[in-house]
Image (cartoon, rainbow, N blue to C red):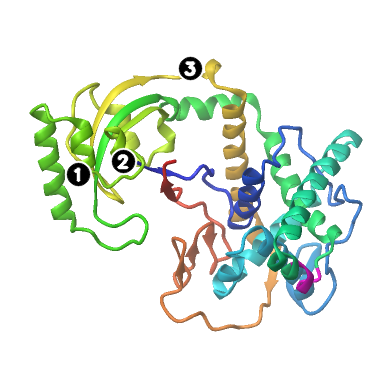
Amino acid sequence: MLRTKPLKKGILLALTAVLVIVLAAGCGKKEEAPNTGGKPATGQTKAPGEGEGKVIATYKDGTVTDGEFNKYTSFFGIVNPQTAMYLSIPQLKEQFLREYVGYKILSTRLTLTDDEKKKAQEETDAFYTQVKTAMDQNPDLKKTVEDAKLSEADIKYFYNMIMSIMKSEESKVKDDAVKKYYEDNKNDYNLITARHILVATADSATGEELRTEEEALKRAKEVKAKLDKGGDWNALAKQYSDDPGSKDKGGLYENQEAKGWVPEFKDAANKQEINKIGEPVKTDYGYHVIKVEKRESTPFDKLTDEKKLAIKQTIAAENLNTFMTKELPDLITKIDLPKEEAPAGDGATNGGAANGGEAEGGAANDGKTNAPADDKKEEAK
């Protein structure tokens, strides 16, 4: 089955890059927010590159120079190699700059106790240790860092700034907000066992068209008819399904949390009659023939601490996105990036159409940062 990525809606483009590397590396700790008050736990009080070069952004109480911004983008080039691709598109580069201004402003609004400062230092040091290990094992990465003239203090500064802001937003989310979010989305936490056969319209690996929608629907109805007559799920999944994650298991996904699935599949899994094969369900990937075998609700008091933390992070990301969208544009007085021509083509990348001003994480042309309508999908593992 094709599932949504385990990233929360509303997390901004730049922040997503940091969170991906943190989650993948296991750096994220469940400690209280390492808030920095604009003075990172590293002790460095001035942003790397600050004041160097031409002023490219002016905002209430400050400026950003191209030297500083280059340091920042170089940092993200370490944690997300796709940064260079994003920044090759003028609208996305401007969006990235605006978001950085937003982070700088938010970093001045934070407070930090001595205990939080100590924890922040520990977490930042742990992150840099992993970066250092990666550089020791990867000569190309080491060269990238050296070419960008990124010091240990630079890397720690930017990491600490972003994580401090996100953790600070998390600390503002109260228990009643977490409970309300759960109540508004309680079906997302249903545990479901279902079988499905996917008749895809395109190859999930290459994007090459396999069949038209009409052909896929006809094939899905064909397999449903065979299942309705008592056909064997194991045999028919192997014959018909284009989902590599389940075709050799009779299409089975057992005790899966509903929120992990793409919206149309999730909706069917939450509503279909138990043990009845439903009509084909259309998603971005084709048509699914689904049978729900079990569905159990998860009461709020049965949610694990990890799941409650995930809700808190989702709300925090949405609040951060609201700041970037609603408040930040009025705080920025001027953006003066050198004019660049967009690459040939339509300028779209990763679900964002640069020419239209919209991209993953937001709309660049009007300076606003909007959450994507839907999380992107990946193959279930």
Residue 84 x/y as whole percent: 61, 70
**SS of the residue under disc 3:** loop
The quadrant holding residue 83 is bottom right
The residue pinned by badge 1 equals 240
Q: Tell me if I can see residue 20 in this picture.
A: yes
Give the mark nearer the N terminus: 3 vs 2.
2
- Density class for disc 3 (Cα within 10 Å; few <14, some 14-19, many ≥20) is few
Magenta-drawn segment: 145-149
Give the mark nearer the N terminus: 3 vs 1.
1
Residue 147 is a magenta residue = yes
Image quarter hosting the N terminus: top left
* Residue 264 numbered mark, or none: 2
- Density class for disc 2 (Cα within 10 Å; few <14, some 14-19, many ≥20) is some
Give the CA separation, mark 1 to mark 2: 20 Å
The quadrant holding residue 319 is top right
The quadrant holding residue 207 is bottom left
| Residue 356 position (above or below residue 307) | below
Type of amino acid under label 2: Glu
Q: Could you tell whether 37 is left or right of 56 in the image?
A: right
Residue in view at x 80 percent, y 47 percent: 124
The residue pinned by badge 3 equals 299
Give the CA separation, mark 3 to mark 2: 23 Å
**SS of the residue under disc 2:** helix
Q: Could you tell whether 112 is left or right of 209 in the image?
A: right
Residue 374 is a magenta residue = no
| Residue 307 position (above or below residue 161) | above
Residue in view at x 79 percent, y 40 percent: 34
Q: Tell me if I can see residue 58 in this picture.
A: no
Type of amino acid under label 3: Pro
Give the mark nearer the N terminus: 1 vs 2.
1
Residue in view at x 55 percent, y 16 percent: 301
